[in-house]
Image (cartoon, helix red, strand yellow):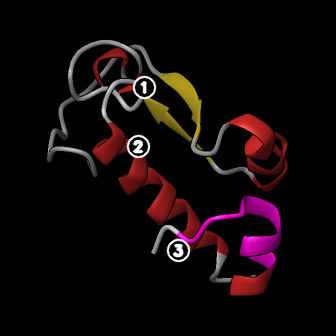
Amino acid sequence: MLLDGDFTYKPYLEEHHVLFGNTHAFAEAEGLKVNLCLEHHRNGPAAVHNNAKNARILMAKAQEVYERTHTREEWMKNAGKNYL
């Protein structure tokens, strides 16, 4: 697992849009989403909704993946912030 090296099987996952607010629609359209277990999504200190560091890790990874097929300028136009 990218967030803390936890590769154990999780029977229940939730979809998390890596970008939020006015960039939520962009994240949805571009598939900038990940499946997270409850511990890493909403519950606990490592959850991306409770932990800015972990949220930023996912944002940087989303930008990295997006920029494989798009330009930095396109990212900035749509996301508004450089996470790399």
The amino acid type, in three-letter code, at marker 2 is Ala
**Mark 2, residue position:** 55
Q: Which residues are magenta?
A: 74-82
Q: Nearer the viewer, residue 5 or 83?
A: 83
Label 1 crowd (10 A; few <14 / some 14-19 / many >=20): some
Q: Nearer the viewer, residue 52 or 64?
A: 52
The 10 Å Cα crowd at callout 2, few under 14, some 14 to 19, many 20 or more, is some
Q: CA distance from mark 1 to mark 3?
A: 21 Å
Mark 2 vs 1: CB contact within 8 A: yes
**In magenta segment, residue 77:** yes
Q: Nearer the viewer, mark 2 or mark 3?
A: 2
- Residue neighbourhood size for the residue with mark 3, other residues' Cα within 10 Å, grouped as few (<14), some (14–19), many (≥20): some
Give the residue at x 34% y 24%: 50
Q: Which residue occupies 16% across, 44% down?
A: 4
Amino acid at circle 3: Glu
- Label 1: which secondary element: loop
| Viewer-side label of 1, 3 | 1
SS at badge 3: helix
Residue 49 tag number: 1
The kind of residue on which mark 1 rests is: His
Image height of 21 relative to 57, above or below: above
